[in-house]
Amino acid sequence: MSQYPEAHFIKSANALSQFVPDTGAEVAVAGRSNAGKSSAINVIVNRRQFARTSKTPGRTQLVNFFSLRDEQRLIDLPGYGFAKVSVKKRAHWRDLMADYFEARQSLRGLFLIVDIRRQLTAFDEQMLAFAEQVSLPTHVLLTKTDKLKRGQAAKALLEVRRDLGDVATAQHFSALTRLGEDEARAKLNEFLALPGAE
């Protein structure tokens, strides 16, 4: 059973003016289009097809707002770096992300979804920079951990934690085996409980 029985989709937005009211607390989820972002969201919320998964990376092209419980939201940000879109569209996404991170007073934390086999890319670094600029706590999910042998996975996690330093925390995660599910959900609830800016 889902720990968020009242969870539901609210709306999609393509501009700052379309965002839901900036009240309560919300946690954003970002990552490359093929890193398994939607699958990770579905496992953490424990709802199949809560965030739609697609065999075509880059389908999330809007800011998607989901309610978890009263005044607590999960925000699925546009997948980046893989979708075949125009330079103009990419620039729009980048501006939309800057607007989102700078404007949202209710934003409490960021989940960055990273394929453990790729580790941190330039796009991930850009997202970390957005978060650091606004002092936003960030947690990295190293997805698809089941694709690596245990020793390789352990080495990759150590390397990512070393690269992140104090900027973010990180953990193993697999939507297929549900490895790291409880740890990720605990971190989500921890972020949602953080006090807002005065």
Image (spheres, helix red, strand yellow):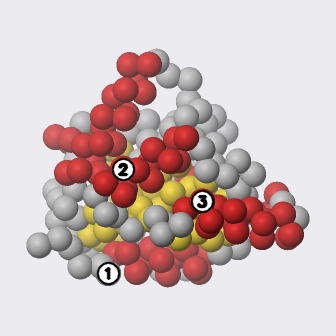
User: Which of marks 3 and 2 precedes in the sequence?
Assistant: 2
Report x, y in % for residue 66: 36, 59
Residue 193's disc is 1
In the displayed structure, would residue 125 be above or below residue 74? above
Residue 163's disc is 3
Q: CA distance from mark 2 to mark 3?
A: 17 Å
Q: Report the mark closest to the observer, 1 or 3.
A: 3
Q: Is residue 48 visible?
A: no
Say which residue label 2 marks: 130
Q: Secondary structure at mark 3?
A: helix
Q: Report the mark closest to the observer, 2 or 3.
A: 3
Q: Secondary structure at mark 2?
A: helix
Q: Secondary structure at mark 1?
A: loop
Residue at 61% over, 67% down? 161
Binning the other alpha carbons within 10 Å of mark 1 as few (below 14), some (14 to 19) or many (20 upward) gives few
Q: Is residue 138 visible?
A: yes
In the displayed structure, would residue 9 be above or below residue 80? below
**Front position in the image: 87 or 165:** 165
Report x, y in % for residue 71: 24, 71
User: Which of marks 1 and 2 precedes in the sequence?
Assistant: 2
Q: Report the mark closest to the observer, 2 or 1.
A: 2
